[in-house]
Image: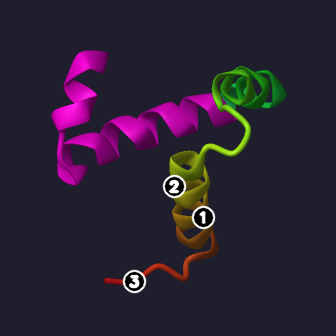
Amino acid sequence: MKIDDIALADADALAPILLAAIQRLGQLGRSGAVALARQVEDGDADFDEAAGWIEEIAAGTLTD
């Protein structure tokens, strides 16, 4: 998937890409987190929303 395709992609198309990216950032450790932090603007509501959902997934509390 190209970056331009993301705006029109549905959740089922994005989820495996996001998972792979998050796992790779995790492998990179702090440097991965710092690289991501450089991309996120302060007060980015969409990022904050996504981060909240990812927290629930990581905690195992998100269910259908």
Tell me the CA gap for discs 3 and 2: 16 Å
Q: Which residue is mark 2?
A: 50
Residue 10 at x, y percent in the picture: 18, 47
Mark 3 / mark 2, whichever is N-terminal: 2
Q: Which residue is mark 3?
A: 63
The question of residue 55 being in magenta is answered with no
User: What residue is rendered at 56% in x and 77% in y?
Assistant: 60
Q: Secondary structure at mark 2?
A: helix
Q: Residues in magenta?
A: 1-26
Question: Is there any visible trace of residue 1 in the rendered image?
Answer: no
Q: Which sits in the foreground, 5 or 55?
A: 5
* Residue type, numbered disc 2: Ala
On the image, which quarter does residue 28 sit in? top right
Tell me the CA gap for discs 1 and 2: 5 Å
For the residues carrying marks 1 and 3, which lies nearer the camera in this image? 1
Q: Which residue is mark 1?
A: 52
Magenta stretch, main secondary structure, is: helix
